[in-house]
Image (cartoon, rainbow, N blue to C red):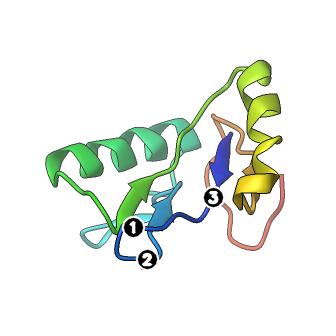
Amino acid sequence: MVPVRPGRRRSGRPTSGAFDLLRLSGTDTTSPYRRRRAALESVFAARRLSAPWALCPSATEADVVREWLTWASVGMEGVVFKRLDDAYRPSVRG
């Protein structure tokens, strides 16, 4: 599960939060979410991405997600739930 929360840089410009990776360097990455998330984290680390890019946090612990759901007052847009072992299927909800 990952929260989707817009952010702002010091300049006032919005940041872009990334929570999933479907294609990388022309390669389909619609494998199970657990592998897509690992690939996304690798991209952020390898490319040393920083503002305006932000890697959305991810968690599988219910208590952490409950805390995220209290963030509405700071502008969080929502929480995305993904099944760790499901491949991405366009236009299909799990």
Cβ–Cβ under 8 Å for marks 3 and 1: no
**Alpha carbon of mark 2 to alpha carbon of mark 1: how far?**
5 Å
**Amino acid type indicated by mark 2:** Gly
Does dot 3 land on a helix, a strand or a loop? loop
Seen from the viewer's position, the closer of residues 12 and 21 is 12
Q: Are marks 2 and 1 in contact (CB under 8 Å)?
A: yes
Question: In the figure, 76 relative to 71: above or below?
Answer: below
Q: Secondary structure at mark 1?
A: loop
Determine which of the numbered discs, if any, sits on residue 9 in the image. Answer: 1
Residue under numbered circle 3: 5
- Of residue 94 and residue 74, the one placed in the foreground of this image is 74
Q: Amino acid at mark 3?
A: Arg
- Local secondary structure at mark 2: loop
Q: Position of residue 16 (x, y in %)?
A: 46, 69
Neighbor class of circle 3 (other Cα within 10 Å; few <14, some 14-19, many 20+) is many
**Residue at image location 71% in from the left, 55% down from the top:** 74
In which quarter of the view is residue 2 placed? top right
